Image (cartoon, rainbow, N blue to C red):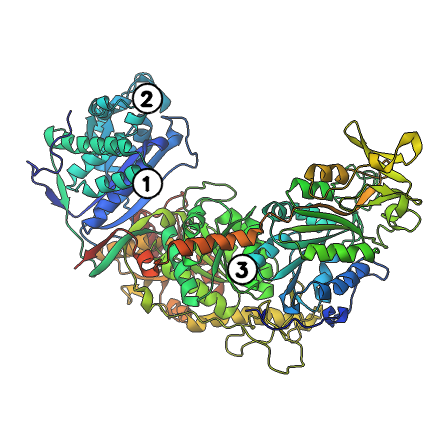
Amino acid sequence: MTSTDLPLPTYKPKDFASDQDVRWCPGCGDYAVLAAVRKTLPKVGRRKEDFVFVSGIGCAARFPYYMETYGLHSIHGRAPAFATGIKLANPNLDVWIVSGDGDLLSIGGNHTIHVMRRNVGVRILLLNNRIYGLTKGQYSPTSERGKVTKSTPMGSIDEPVNPLALALAAECTFVARCIDVDVKMLGPTMERAAGHAGCAFIEVYQDCNIFNHQAWFYASQKDTRPNNTVDLVHGEPLIFGENRDKGVMIVNGRPRAVTLGTGGVTEKDLLVHDETDRTLAFTLANMRSPELPEPLGVLYCNPDRPAYEQESCEQIRQAQQARPDADLATLVAGPDTWTVG
Amino acid sequence: MTSQAPEAPSTTSPTPVEAVAVRFAGDSGDGMQLAGGQFTSTTAVLGNDFSTFPDFPAEIRAPRGTTFGVSGFQVHFAARPIHTPGDAVDVLVAMNPAAFKTNVAEVRPGGMIIADEDEFTGVGLKKAGYGPDERPLADEVLASRFRIVTVPMTRIVREALAETGQSAKEIDRCRNMFALGLVCWMYDRPLTPTIDWLESYFGEKKKRPEIAAMNVTALKAGWAFGETTEAIPERYQVAAAELPPGLYRKINGNEAMVLGLAVAGAKADTQVSYCGYPITPASDLLHGLSALKQFGIQTFQAEDEIAAVAAAIGVSYAGGIGVTGTSGPGLALKGEALGLAVMLELPLVVVDVQRAGPATGMPTKTEQADLLQAMYGRSGEAPCVVLAAASPSDCFDTAIEAVRLAVRAMCPVIVLSDAGIANGAEPWQVPDVASIPPISIEHPLAEPDADEAFEPYLRDPETLARRWAIPGTPGLEHRLGGLEKDGTTGAVTYDGPNHQTMIAARAEKVARVAAVIPPIEVGGDAGADSLVVGWGGTRGAIVSATERLQRDGVPTAMVHLRHLNPMPPNLGEVLARYRNIIVPEINTGQLAMLLRAHYLVDARTVSVVQGRGFHVEELVEGIRNAIEEAGR
C-alpha cells in the first residue's frame, strides 16, 4: 500500500500546492496558515501520498482542496470521526484535520472531545476566528459575550468555550496555541505536532478580515503581542513584555502578572514552564488578557500514551497470535451442530 | 422432591404430534431467554425444524412481578418444515401472575398453561394488577378454555436446593431450569445438552461450579416432577423434520449478519472495520464482531451514530471495508453522512435492524417501517442500494451480497434486517465457506510517466463505478468532498448541467446493479390471479399463509424481494401478469407505494403494525379480504 522502502523525495512547499484557485477572501488569515502548512510538510519526513487532509464545513474546511495531497472535505463537524476511521484502516497515514471554531467546537464538539480522549494519532488545526464566516457573520462558540452579530443584535449571551481548556479536559496529549501570521512559531509547532504519536491539537488565532476583523489584534500585532501574550518554552520561566521585564508567578496558588525588579521579584520567582505538567497546562490555558498574558506555544505534551489506532491494531495482532488456528469455516459452523440425513 | 431418575425410561409413552409452540414467560430476571434458548438447542439436536421468538421488554429489570417486566421466549418446533414462531401457543409456562396475565391471550383454546402456583399469592397477584378477589388459576372461564396445570415450582426448587446453603435468591433463580426440565419431560427432550451447557458456562467459564450443580439439580427436579406426579397426564413427541441432508446449526439474524460480514471480508481479502454505536436491537452486531479480532476484524464503538457512520466512511476512503450498523433512529442520524458517501462514491455497508418506531417507539419490538427511510431518507438525490434479509439465516447471504455490491458500484448499500429475524433463531444448513466466490477489489496505481492529474470520477463504462484510489498510493493524490464535482476532473463546480449529469450518473450506477440481480422467481401457484409480494423478515409468514390459502382453495402466487433498490429486472413483467397484487407489510404500505410508483400497478396493502411478526392466520385473512375487495 505504501512505498516506505523508497528513498524520501525532497519536497518544496509548491509540491504541496494543488491546482485549485484558493477562494478565501483576500486578507484572510487562512492564507498564512496554508502557506505555513505547505512550508512545514517538506520538513516532517513523510511521503506526499501519505498525507491526508480532512475537514468539516466552513471557510477553513476548504483547506484540503488547496493541498496537493489526499483530502476529504466531509460534512459539518464530523471531520474527527472521518479521520478516526482513516487512521483505523491505515495507521501509517499522516492525517491532518483543519477546520474552524464553529465546525470543531459547536456542531462537532462531541467528536472533537472523543478524538482527543481516545488519542487518535491525528493533527488538529483549529482555525479560530471567533465567528461564522461561511454563513456570513453569526457569533460562534468562541465569540465573546456581548458580541453583536446578525443573530445577536443585542449581543451574545453565550459564554465562549476555551479551546485549550477543553482539549486538556478531553485528555488531549499535545495542546498548543499559535497565531496565524506568526509563521516562526506556527511552523515549528506544526513540526512538533507532526512528530507526535497521539492526538495533537493546535489552536490558531486566525483573523476573519470580513466578519470579525481584528478580533485577535490585541495579541497578534507587533505592538500588542509582547504585552498580551507569553511565549512558552519548556524549562524556561514565563517572561513577557516589550522589554521582557514582566513575568508570571504563582501567588496563593494562582498565576499573577508581575514586573521583574518590582517588590523584589526576580526571575527565580517566576513560574517555569513544564510541558509535561497537565495541571500547570490548565492554569496556563485559563490565563486571559488583559489580566494575564495569553500563552502561545506548546502548553502540554505527553508523548508516552500510545495512539488509539496503534492499540486497536495491536489488539487484532494479539488476538491473531493467540488464535493462529482461527478458521472461518469452523467459525461459521459454530460449536453446536447436528447432522441431518 | 428429589432429583432422581432423570431421563430414565418413562412410564408413559409419548403421543406423536406434528408441531408445537411453547412459550416460557416470566419476570425479566427469571431467565426465560436462557430457558427458551436451551430448549431450542435441545430441539435442534433432535432434528426438528424450529423458529423462535424472543419477546422481551426494553426495561432491563423492571420492578419484579409487574406486567411490564414480563419476558417471554416462544419456540415453535415441528416434524415438518415451518417458517414462523407460531401464531398461538400450545403450552405457556407462566412463572408468575404477570406472565400469566400478559400471555394468556396468546394461548390457543385447549392449550396448556403451566403456572408456578407459589407465585400466585396476594403480593404477586397484586403486582400483576389482579384485584383482591381475583384468582386467575381458579377462574372457571379460563379453566374451561385452557388446561391449567399448577405446579409448586418455587417450593420444590427450594426443597431440592435447601442443603446447598445458598441464599434464597440464588436458589429461586434456578426455577427456570425446573420449568425447562418439566417441559423437556413433557416433550421427550434429553437433558444432556442443557446439563453440558450449564457445566461449561457456569462451571468452567464463570468458575461457579456450585451454581452449575444447583441448576442441574433444579433441571432434573423438573423432569422428575413430570415423571412421578400425574400433574401432566400426557407426554408428546415431535419427530425429526425432513430437512435437506447436511450439517446444521442454530442461528439468529444478528449472528448470521456477523458471520456474513466476516466471510465477506475474507472473500475480499480486505479488513472489515465495523463502526457502531450501541442501539437495540443491533448491538449484538457490535458484540459479535468485536469477538472476531482473530479473523482480523476491527471494531470501533463510536461516540454516536453519526461518528460511527463517519468513521466507517473514513475506513472505506482509506481502503478498508467500512461497515456500520444501527436501528431506525440511528439511520436517521446517519442520513447526512450517507449522502456524503453517495457523493464521495465510496463503498459502505449500513445495516439497519429495524424496530418499532417512530422515535424510541418500542425498541425491542419488530417493524418494517424503515423502507422508505432507507430508500429516500437523505437530502438531495441520493440513491443507495437497498437489500433486505428474509430470515435469520438469510442475513448471512445478504451481508455478503451487500459487500459485493458496495465495492462493485462504489456506493452505500443499506441492509434491512428487523428485530424479529435479528433475535429469532432457526436451523441453518452450514454453508461451504470455501465455495463462496471471492469478492474482487481493485485499487488503481498511477500510470507510469502519467503527467495528467488523477481523475477520480472517471467511470467504468459497464458499472459506472469510479475507481477506488486510496491514500498512500503515489501519484494519485486527489480530493473528495461533499461539494459537487466536475465529472471529469473532479474539481469543485457549481455548473448546472454538470450537476444534472452527475445526479443521473449516480442514479444510473445504482440502477445498473440490477444487471447482477437474479430474476425474481414466482412461488406458490404461479398461474393464480393473485400475487402476494413481500420483502424482508416476513417471508416465513407469507410462505405459510400462501400454503394455507392453496390448501383452502384460494390460488395464490408469491414473490419475495431481497432487492428493494434496484428491484429485480423482471419484476415489472411479473407484476403485469397478475390481476391482484397484495403486499403484506409490518408498516402501513411502504413497498406498496413503491410498486405503485415504479410499475403503475394497483398494489393493495395488508398491514399489521403491532410490534410483532405476522400471525399466519391474520395474514391468510388479510390476503383473502384483499382478493375479495379487488374483485368488487
Question: What label sits on residue A89 in the rendered view?
Answer: 3
Find disc 2 in the rendering and name its residue: B125
- Residue at 16% x, 48% y is B18
Which chain hosts label 2?
Answer: B
Dot 1 alpha-carbon crowd within 10 angstroms: few under 14, some 14 to 19, many 20 or more: few
In the figure, is residue B216 to the left or right of B402? left
- Residue at 27% x, 53% y is B249
Q: Is residue B95 above or below residue B313?
A: above
Instruction: Tell me the CA gap for discs 2 and 3.
Output: 56 Å
Q: Position of residue B147 (x, y in %)?
A: 19, 31
> Disc 3 marks which amino acid?
Ala
Secondary structure of the residue carrying tag 1 is helix
Of callouts 1 and 2, the N-terminal one = 2
> Is residue B404 visible in this depiction of the protein?
yes
Which chain hosts label 3?
Answer: A
Secondary structure of the residue carrying tag 3 is helix
Q: Position of residue B378 (x, y in %)?
A: 58, 57
Instruction: Tell me the CA gap for discs 3 and 1.
Output: 33 Å
In the figure, is residue A208 to the left or right of B580? right
State if disc 2 and disc 1 touch (CB < 8 Å).
Answer: no
Q: Position of residue B184 (x, y in %)?
A: 18, 39
Find disc 1 in the rendering and name its residue: B205
Secondary structure of the residue carrying tag 2 is helix
In the figure, is residue B263 to the left or right of A213? left
In the figure, is residue B115 to the left or right of A229? left
Circles 1 and 2 on the same chain: yes
